[in-house]
Image (spheres, coloured by chain):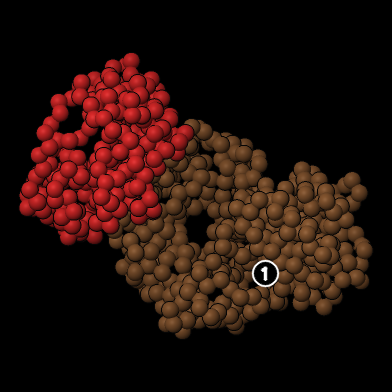
Amino acid sequence: MSRLTVVLAGINAPGYRSLALDYLEAAALADPRLDIAVNRFDLDTATDPWWIAYRILSLEPVPDVVALPVLCWTAEAVYTVARLVKEARPKTLVVLGGPEVGPIAEQVMLEQPHVDAVVRGEGEHAFAELLRSHARGGDIGGTPGVTAREGARVVHGPERSPLEDLDSLPSPFGKVRHATDGSAYVETYRGCPHRCAYCFEGKGSTRIRSFSWERIASDIDAVASTPGMGAFSFIDPVFNLTPDRLGRLADIMEPHARRGVRLHTIEVDIERVDAEQASQLVRAGVVSVETGPQSIGSAALGECNRTFDRDRFAAGVQACRSAGISVECDLIIGLPGDTPDDVIDGIDFVISLDPGRVQLSTLHVLPGTDLWERAADLGLAFDPRAPHEVVATRELSFADLRRLEVLGNAAARTYAARLRTRT
Amino acid sequence: MITYVKVPIGTGGVPACVACAMTKDIAPLPLAAVDDALGRAAARVAPGAVFNVALTGIEAFSHPELPRLIGAARAHGADRIRLSTDGRFLAQGGNAYGAVSAGVTHLELVLVGGDAAAHDRLTKRPGAFDSACAGAREFIAAARSSALLSGRIPLCRHAVADAPATVALLASLGAVAVELDASSLNGSPAHAGLLAAACETATVNRVAAWVTGWDGELPVPYVTPPWRTEDGVAA
């Protein structure tokens, strides 16, 4: 087997680094059956794709494999990079993965002829196995968890079950110098207890798979102990999954919090936050949390499999605010079932709570989500091109959506302009 | 939405079409009277609620005690402070930066026309438009994300034809929202189309717009402001 040169290229929000590529890289480098040299790029969305392609194609030697994670808002840039790389170097294997492409792998392969393979679902083992096959000169088609080409055909390898033992994955956290400005993330579990119709976090299941507490503590310590660490975050969709879990996370973080390390934009189930949970969050060093309600309209909540208790939501926000924790309340414009009044009522509601921050976004109908599957039944029209922004719903016309976006932006800007948060 | 409480600080100086509106002499209210009104307004705020105040009724930068008025509002716990201005004085003497530093979080720029020819002609204030634009730009530069600019267009039969252009101009200056004050239009259906055009101009420029003082039908739904303003207490 010859040594493979592999490029892992992430296109991220400015200042961020791809945690997914961190895991892929760590898993591939730890695989004793692989002999690879890895070039890792973390570029941002402001970088012209032609210059991203330049970074790849100017390497010596020419990479054997180029792998790029794809999110809905990076898809167009990634496809451009893939096209340029493949045209310039036809022998380079171009591999994509991530939530934008995994659920619709065959469609991506048909629409993007320059892509050689799509990794579906969790990528660590699938990608490593793909590399082993490629290094042996073998066919990557048939690799579990991979959709690839065999001649003119697109073939799907068998489904790969989600990893049972997450601890078997090499930790990426001790191997890189983590950003200290808030852009580093830690993962303590995979999955989500909720099944929100617009979200792919749970991948269609409410099953939670957690790293062991030893591993969690080790990963957190590795990040939090980075010299100069100011703040970081967690990608876990519900930080306060259980009171016990929250308490244990607070136990691990407390020594770091005492040194001044802070956690920001931690996602929580706000309706479960009371004074005790708020105190645990404080103990963990949390300065800001992020939560819904996404909508307060009963029809939209029903369509999206969400519950909402106005009083408990308000109480949770109050508990956080009383503990000195800022709450970012998120609202989505364009959920099926929401009327213009529902959206405006939602804005009114979150602003009335004075949470700290109000964030509005327009619905993106993401591949693999419940809304993606039921869009036609729901009367949900969306842009087939990524990032799949909603175009119209039964209740909101295209014009309604634009007007509500503008109104919501103005309301959020007005809310944010205040003396108490001026530094 | 955010609710501002109006606290008058005087009368006069607010730009309007001089052919349609009586020009009022500028009459600032005494600091002590405004301070008292601020205190009474603040006392009405429910426990735990936020006190947001709009200092109204007068060209704000013509009040000789403006910095102290802003200070009084802050002393009474105001978290958001809105002023209304025609912008002429913003670019003078560091007023824009001074306003932000003093605690202004929201500046409402009142314009009657979308260019110098319209605005200066209607208000009979030569040079006012250019000064307003320069002042607004200074304010935006000073504010960054800690304060915002909005617009208000007092419409009359002379100014309404220029409403879309005025909205576009305010958008170019960085306004996040525009109020179209149609109370002087008397609900004339002839103007509904222009109001709608102005509102749509706002939307395509990503500026929120709403119409006040209009009783008739509008072909587009623009009635929701991103904030509310309540009558407060008189000084």
Residue appearing at x 90%, y 59% in the figure: A139
* Image position, residue A221 (x, y; %): 55, 81
In the shown orientation, is residue A265 left or right of residue B81? right
* Image position, residue A40 (x, y; %): 71, 66
Please give the residue where the numbered disc 1 appears in the rendered image. A22
Above or below, comparing residue A202 to residue B215 in the picture: below
In the shown orientation, is residue A318 left or right of residue A62? left
Farthest top residue? B190
| Colour of chain B as rendered | red
From this viewpoint, is residue A170 visible? yes
Q: Nearer the viewer, residue A383 or A297?
A: A383
- Tell me the element at label 1: helix
Tell which subunit mark 1 falls on.
A
Residue appearing at x 73%, y 63% in the figure: A8
Above or below, comparing residue B226 to residue A263 in the picture: above
* Image position, residue B23 (x, y; %): 15, 28
In the shown orientation, is residue A101 left or right of residue A244? right
Q: Which chain is brown in the rendering?
A: A
